[in-house]
Image (tube, rainbow, N blue to C red):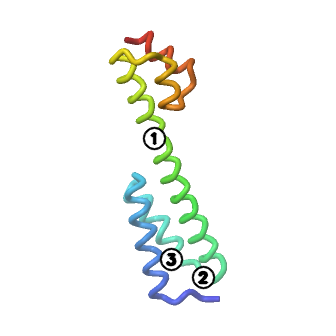
Amino acid sequence: MKIPENLVTLLINVIRVLMEKSGYDHNVIEKYLSYVEKQEGKEQISMFEAVIESLIEERIEAKEEGRIEERKLNARNAIAEGVPLETVQKITGLDMESIRKFASEL
């Protein structure tokens, strides 16, 4: 099964943008996409699926890491403002050990 050329071009451009936003080196992106573009049929489809899935997973993980860092920052700020540690734990959902550590660092 051959993917229509216009769809291959679209997928390559989408993957390029996702890889750039994920911080991949330009040369790495171009080498990889050149390799994928030369493949045909099921192998090309599998490669498109794998790279898109991987990039989406990376983006989800990065967002989750960002949320965790935001919760840690909120905890530190609340502790600095004198909010009781138990309240900080309830609001942020962070474990009490981490919250105590943040408090000891102030």
Kind of residue indicated by mark 2: Glu
User: Which secondary structure lies at badge 2?
Assistant: loop
Quadrant hosting residue 82: top left
- The quarter of the picture where the C terminus appears is top left
Disc 3 and disc 2: Cα gap in Å? 8 Å
Disc 3 and disc 1: Cα gap in Å? 36 Å
Q: Are marks 1 and 2 in contact (CB under 8 Å)?
A: no
- The residue singled out by tag 2 in the image is 40
In the image, which disc is placed on residue 37? 3
User: Which secondary structure lies at badge 3?
Assistant: helix
Kind of residue indicated by mark 1: Arg
Q: Which callout, 1 or 2, points to the residue nearer the camera?
A: 1
- The residue singled out by tag 1 in the image is 67
- The quarter of the picture where the N terminus appears is bottom right
Up-down relation of residue 94 to residue 41 (above or below)? above
Kind of residue indicated by mark 3: Glu
Report the residue at 44% width, 87% height from top: 6
Left or right: where does residue 26 sit relative to residue 47? left
Up-down relation of residue 90 to residue 59 (above or below)? above
Report the residue at 48% width, 53% height from top: 59
* Residue neighbourhood size for the residue with mark 1, other residues' Cα within 10 Å, grouped as few (<14), some (14–19), many (≥20): few
